[in-house]
Image (spheres, rainbow, N blue to C red):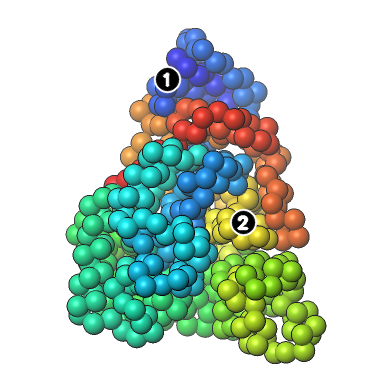
Amino acid sequence: MTLLIRDALVYDGTGAPPMRADVAVEGDGIVAVGPDLPLHAAEVRDAGGLALAPGFIDVHTHDDAVALEAEGLHPKLSQGVTTVVTGNCGISLAPSPMQGREAPPPPLDLIGEASAYRFARFGDFLDALRAFTPGCNVVPLVGHHVLRARAMADLARPATEAEVAAMRADLAEALAAGAAGMSTGLAYPPAKHATTDEVAALAADVAAAGRLWTTHMRDERLGVVSSVAETLDVARRSGVRTLISHHKCCGEAAFGLSTTTLAMIDKARETMQIDLDLYPYTASSTVLIETFARDSRKVAISWSEPHPEMEGRDLAEICAEWGVDQATAIARLRPGGAIYHQMDDGDLERILAYPPTLVGSDGLPRDKRPHPRLWGAFPRVLGHYARDKGVVPLETAIAKMTGQTARTLHLADRGRIAPGCKADLVLFDPAAIRDAATYDDPVRPAEGIAGVWVNGALAWAEGRPTGAPRSGAVLAA
């Protein structure tokens, strides 16, 4: 045995109540689980009754570029995440959309500048990840925005049949290379004019390959009900497994609509595979878009290329200082990003408590002043919402971020603590775990995380990286 963790309170990722047990690891895999295992190991760790869970799976990230950086995934390791799903919201590094463009069209600039989009084919990106060895496991999605940008010079219109055919060809290459599925971001300019038929045609190819479609829906505000209806229509027509990204109801006029949307999803689940995820905050974060700011109680600038001195500032204060209206200020600040305070905790708790809901951070690692979800999403679910508010039991919260997510992603040997599963593990104190990152101080590791193992190697311990060689794997389909 290479590792034996003794006397842990084991949450196995299935949603079952915890049990006191030992966990034995050989190499990158779990070989035995049970009380008082009569085994010896090269390394023995006394858990002292702390909770041991499967490593958390962040189902919604924008970590494509930072997965190729030595310290790029530290925000995830620090909160117990051992697997990240990249390529969400239609945004992926490959295949490159830069033909004839000097800069990636927003929101592609959220994950990198033009130089980051250097992979001509999706398989080239996966080869680079494998050669580098990321700090966490990576499940890669291909983004609809890059498919569209490769096929179309002018994105502000519906695609022609020939252009959809070109997208399908690039999608086929990505799926053959190992993409776990395709993501769309229909709220953003590159896909705003994409028709439902275009999305359904691509989703049908994803379904034929047995892969997953994730979607940042067209409208998460007052039109959220119609957006859910469109999503379910695509799923019905294509037969694709579907994951609704960061489900929420933005703007006061939309508060409470989650009762309607969850009922729609529940009905659809009788005949289709529909899942959803959320991040545990009532503020969102993305590129600067005036329509997003309009429905927000407060908007804080997270980055601005022309005005970096405004990072962290309130948009209303900037408008007053410059003597301009909101639309003019946003135009001056672009390219840029913002944190939008625009959701209601009642909707958030209702969505979190809904049994199929998974957890994703949606963190933006390139932001100069990021949303605290980048460093705190998973501990916030466990500490604030499960332990302190009792929205869900701790074992249920853990299942939502481990075993349930692994099933959605078809990761047979991840997300559970059981013999035959990979040794992705997180040891934490249930009484102490909490998100330390705040909107004012967003780059702070979580508290209460004692150890994080990725494929059997200790990567994070007692608030800092261990310095061990990176041990993540590319979990291609």
Return the x and y of residue 125 as percentages of the image width and height: 36, 50
**Real-space Cα distance between discs 2 and 1?**
33 Å
Q: Nearer the viewer, residue 103 or 244?
A: 103
Q: Is residue 453 above or below residue 124?
A: above
Residue drawn at the location 80% of the way across and 83% of the way down = 321
Q: Earlier in the sequence, mark 2 or mark 1?
A: 1
Q: Amino acid at mark 2?
A: Arg
Q: Residues within 10 Å of mark 1 (few under 14, many from 20)?
A: some
Q: Amino acid at mark 1?
A: Glu
Q: Identify the mark at residue 373; answer none if there is no mark.
A: 2
Q: Residues within 10 Å of mark 2 (few under 14, many from 20)?
A: many
Residue drawn at the location 62% of the way across and 24% of the way down = 47
Residue 380 visible, this orientation:
yes
Quarter-wise, where is residue 349 in the image? Answer: bottom right
Quarter-wise, where is residue 372 in the image? Answer: bottom right
Residue drawn at the location 75% of the way across and 79% of the way down = 318
Q: Identify the mark at residue 181; answer none if there is no mark.
A: none
Return the x and y of residue 27 as percentages of the image width and height: 42, 22
Q: Is residue 10 above or below residue 70?
A: above
Disc 1 secondary structure class: strand
Q: Nearer the viewer, residue 336 or 8?
A: 336
